[in-house]
Amino acid sequence: MIAPVSEDRLALISQSHARQMSLCDDLEVIADGLPSNVNLQLCLHLARAVCPTVAAAHEVEERVLFPAVKTLSTTLPDIDSMIERLRWEHFEDMCFAEELHDALLAIGRGEPTMTPEAAGYMLRGFFESVRRHVAFEREMLSPLMELALRKAEAGRLSRTAS
């Protein structure tokens, strides 16, 4: 059974987006500082943070966002295939996060295993992808979740009035 949508669930999505965007901002600082102006401690901190941040975002999407949006599948029949595509993207995102973890550890330890150009390309590829993902959720899925909230509230009100 799908749990009802609530304002708390909307806040969870918003908080997840804020954490992801903060991670992206920090990764951009690293990318902009390559090759000679890199905060090694920040690299080590981000290496520890990248996988848990991505995993937590996926958890919120899987547990909160997707089920809420899925309630609209009778209204929007392509929702199921869109959610399935996003679930598969989670696997790719986590693989990329793990590679980024390794690269950030190496940079932070002063043992880079790739050229500064390659590291910058990797960092930018990751954070631009995350920013696009968050933008899609903010522009498409969050409004659909809010629609599901209104639909669920209307259903509760009509049952209460009966």
Image (cartoon, rainbow, N blue to C red):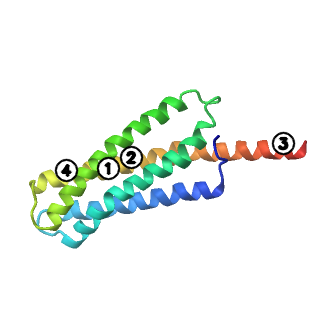
Percent of width and height locating residue 117: 12, 53
Horizontal side, residue 94 vs residue 155: left or right:
left
Q: Is residue 33 above or below residue 56?
A: below
Residue assigned mark 3? 158
Give the Cα separation between the discs numbered 1 and 3: 44 Å
Q: Earlier in the sequence, mark 1 or mark 4?
A: 4
Q: Secondary structure at mark 4?
A: helix
- The picture quadrant where one finds residue 50 is bottom left
Give the Cα separation between the discs numbered 1 and 4: 10 Å
Residue assigned mark 1? 128
Q: In the rendered structure, find residue 12 and report the number of the disc placed on it.
A: none
Q: Are marks 3 and 4 in contact (CB under 8 Å)?
A: no
Which residue is drawn at the image coordinates 46% and 33% (left, top)? 84
Q: Secondary structure at mark 2?
A: helix
Between disc 1 and disc 3, the foreground one is 3
Q: Are marks 1 and 2 in contact (CB under 8 Å)?
A: yes
Percent of width and height locating residue 94: 32, 47
